[in-house]
Image (cartoon, rainbow, N blue to C red):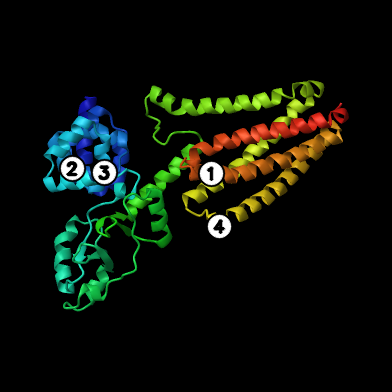
Amino acid sequence: MQTLQSNISLLILSQQLENFYPIDVAAIISNYSDEQLTTLIPLLDKNIWAQIIEQLNSTIQQKILVKMSLEQVIAIFEQMSKDDVVDLLGELPFSTRKAVLKKMKEQDRKIIESLQKFPSDSAGGIMTTEYIALNENLTMAQALAKIKEIAPESEIISVIYLLNNEKQLVGTINLRQILIHKDNDLLKTFQDKVFLTVYPDMDQEEVSQIVSKYDLIAIPVINHRQQLLGIITVDDIIDVIIDEQTEDLLGLGGVDKEERLDMPLLASVSKRLPWLLVNLLTAFLASFTVGLFQSTIQKVVVLASVMSIVAGMGGNAGTQTLSLMIRSIALGKIQVRKEWQFLSKEFCLSLINGAVTGLVTGVTLYFYYHNFYLGLIIFIAMIGNLIIAGVFGYVIPILLKKVNIDPAIASSIFLTTLTDVGGFFIFLMLAKIFLPFLK
């Protein structure tokens, strides 16, 4: 009885999908059981499935596609952009991927295979080949006829790319220009020769920065012969920006970007445990530093209760700088010629913040423990550790970026180590120097 009710609900849903956005339907389907998905597959048209699948996460995409016949998968792929098809193929088992490509139309297969040559996180990996490119010598009337023919299979028609006789990209023209000029006017007469391009091996993050900076709706991808390979549309750039920001956010927490809540237990362990072990090693280093001053702590027990304040504040201040730096690097706002200027500002900022927080902490400890030198020690230590936090919170991401290591993932480990070790060392070394005054 329950299965029958479920099937009726699915049938009703399939008949009312035109009233919903694909992304909303995808959210509903994401919670379906395998049995419900199997029942729903034949109820929806290939066009609807194509729109829905584009909105699903990779796990659900794979779960649905492997339940479909080869013919169903190919029919759905024919309704989708080739760059999206490439992404989906990457989620399928190798044998299924090979079988799908073998049965595809030859023209579609060639396009997909050419796109698969590029890394998934490069300009070539996210570009689409569904655009309108015309010879610059066509008249406006000829261009309109071509546009009507090509437009149904193009992602955007507002920007037309113009090629010379050698198939090189020489300019662009928007659809409005074609519509308002005389039929006999040539395209090249009104083309815009100032346009931005990217090469297929450029990192997708750099592409997103260019598109965002110049408010583009699409950017062409060319080879070194200036021939047009494809275009990257703004909807793909939005996905890139979201992915990159998510990756940076997860990286700051030491979480792999591929990890998901529904991932198998052992897979999650393999993603998280390595970073925890690295953090454990840095914790041992901080503990070793404290151990060097064990005799000092034994003589003045109060040091054990307050030294964590210095390390903790250094970590907090460092995280502020680190977050700002990683964000700036992601947006391409770090300029080499201004690095020293920004570093000096960060030093002064850390000095001021350290002095203020150190003064508040020092005065508080003075009134609580009635010892001026304890307040003085923590005042100096706070300034020293916040300078370490600010300076290295700025420097570490830049250095990691220059050696091609993702700053979002590795920066926090190095910075935490420096602020913990630095904070404990400065505080306890000063305590050792002022030991006669602390008893």
Separation (CA) of disc 3 from disc 4: 36 Å
Q: In what quadrant of the picture does the C terminus appear?
A: top right
Report the front residue among 431 and 79.
Answer: 431
Kindly identify which residue carries mark 1: 399
User: Quick one: label 4 or label 2, which is nearer the N terminus?
Assistant: 2
User: Quick one: label 3 or label 1, which is nearer the N terminus?
Assistant: 3
User: Quick one: label 3 or label 2, which is nearer the N terminus?
Assistant: 2
Secondary structure under tag 1 reads helix
The amino acid at mark 4 is Arg
Kindly identify which residue carries mark 2: 76
Apparent side of residue 103 relative to residue 65 in the rendered image (left or right)? left
Secondary structure under tag 3 reads loop
Separation (CA) of disc 1 from disc 4: 15 Å
Indicate the position of residue 6 as horizontal and vertical percent values: 23, 30
Kindly identify which residue carries mark 3: 117
Kindly identify which residue carries mark 4: 337
In this view, the mark in front (3 or 2): 3
Indicate the position of residue 280 as horizontal and vertical percent values: 56, 25
Visible in this render: residue 118? Answer: yes
Separation (CA) of disc 3 from disc 2: 22 Å
Report the front residue among 170 and 437.
Answer: 170
The amino acid at mark 3 is Lys
Visible in this render: residue 67? Answer: no
The amino acid at mark 1 is Leu
Q: Which residue is drawn at 64% across and 41% down?
A: 389
Would you say the residues marked 1 and 4 are in contact, meaning their CB atoms lie under 8 Å apart? no
User: Quick one: label 3 or label 4, which is nearer the N terminus?
Assistant: 3
Disc 3 crowd rating (10 Å Cα; few below 14, some 14-19, many 20+) is few
Q: Residue at x 40, y 57 (%)?
A: 210
Indicate the position of residue 380 as horizontal and vertical percent values: 77, 40
Q: Which residue is drawn at 21% across and 43% down?
A: 113
